[in-house]
Image (tube, rainbow, N blue to C red):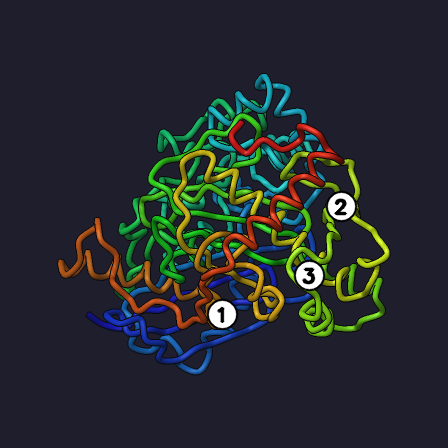
Amino acid sequence: MGIVAGLDSSSAFTRIVVCDADTGAVLRQGYAPHPAEAKATEIDPQAWLLSLGDAAAGGLLEGVQAIGVSAQQHGLVPLDAQGNLVRPALLGNDKRAQVAAADLIDALGGRQAWAEAVGSVPQAAQPVSKLRWMARAEPDTARRVAAVLQPHDWLVWQLLGRPGRRTTDRGGASGTGFWSAGTGSYRHDLVELALGHQVALPEVLGPAEAAGTTPEGLLISAGTGETMAAAFGLGVGIGDAVVSLGASGSVMTVHHEALADPSGMITSFADATGMHLPVVHTLNAVRALRGTAELLGLGELQELSAMAMKSTPGSSGLVLLPYLEGERTPQLPHTAGTLSGLRRESMKPEHLARAAFEGMLCSLADALDVLRGRGVEVRRVFLLGAAAELPAVQAAAPAIFGAQVVVPQPADYAALGAARQAAWALGVSQGTLSPNAPPAWQGAAAQVFEPGDELAVGQAVRQQYGATREQIHPGAFNPTS
């Protein structure tokens, strides 16, 4: 079929993978960091183009027939009526819109109203909250806004030469706070509620549609957000969950329908294939491990893992509720962590180390239960992040999650997902692929861990954790509410 490229413009770098369109085999790669200011809360998006040019230097894209674009999510690129920036782009890590998000929740009548309207409750990161912040903090600038894009929308538009038509995809649109994955349509009234007036919004393309073709004949696919591109690159499907172990955590599954969640614990995104990606976030994951390592005087997480492996499942009765920064699942924003079950025999470093790993994994299993409680099937769990390589995580996760655990080899799955999307759009344009079936690329190379005979042990660990959580925070967690 040809050669395609996937471009991932993250918050810190641009990575490009050039792949065989039929098999997904990586032929060559390019990389360039973003300038230091790209890690701030706002930036001139021209920096993304400069980084893209650096990453593609040396003829990297020679012979490429189609490009897919993945980019950091929740950024807002506000344009005037002529398509020029009215201010620097606001990035997803900008927390200034926290009050604006709370205002929007109240203005529409509460969390349930938002969940039913667009599948998510406003957070500071979302474009809808950024529009509200701009209307309040920069009213003169806000009045000039005539169109809004997200980072991947803007990059696609630039690659196509800034045509009159601007586009996005279902995945990117579902993170805005003013497009519903359930209905597949914009809520223009929510844009007006946030900004005070209507603006032009990009056309939402289907998964296999092309955004356009450059004058040189290079096809540009719809593009998508990093989360959706990574899921596509990993090759996850129905029955799969993706658990990300960062400082905070997230659990994402593939589902056949959008999930409206009045509690706000579930954010219902669309994916890059026509399905849906309900996500549940936790505020505490690896930060609980790092805090425990510091408490025990250990410098590296590998040392904490080795110490934990000297203990046994259940940590001799020691339980750590890892709510160090408050928590989102369950919703306990002002709480703190709890260490429970202290007895003379449990007061050993190895038991505390194991309790940290079990607490983190049980907290993420709670997040999985929120999705299972809504009818989402979970047979296999993809575990992402550097902590997924730790023996203590790999030993405990299958039994605690109650599922097969897959630890993929490190790779830029967002760029691979963008390339796979490009191959799909190219195949449809050539008549060799159906718009209903993406190219069947080989799945990620991975280690696989089975729960085996340890399921009962994992259930006992979870029961011990759940009893402690209920004792400290009675009624706070109801995964089926």
User: Which is more toward the observer, 211 or 324?
Assistant: 324
Mark 3 vs mark 1: which is more N-terminal?
1
| Crowd band around label 3 with a 10 angstrom C-alpha radius: few (<14), some (14–19), many (20+) | few
User: Which is more toward the observer, 314 or 91?
Assistant: 314
Q: Is label 3 in a helix, a strand or a loop?
A: helix
Residue 419, image x, y percentages:
35, 64
Mark 3: amino acid: Glu
User: Which is more toward the observer, 51 or 26?
Assistant: 26
Residue at position x 36%, y 57% from top?
160
Residues at marks 3 and 1, CA–CA distance in whole angstroms: 18 Å
| Residue at image mark 3 | 37
Outermost residue toward the front in this view: 345
Residue at position x 79%, y 45% from top?
338
Mark 3 vs mark 2: which is more N-terminal?
3
Task: Give the number of the disc on residue 325.
Answer: 2
Residue 110, image x, y percentages:
60, 20
User: Quick check: 183 left or right of 128?
Assistant: left
Front of the two marks 3 and 2: 2
Q: Is label 1 in a helix, a strand or a loop?
A: strand
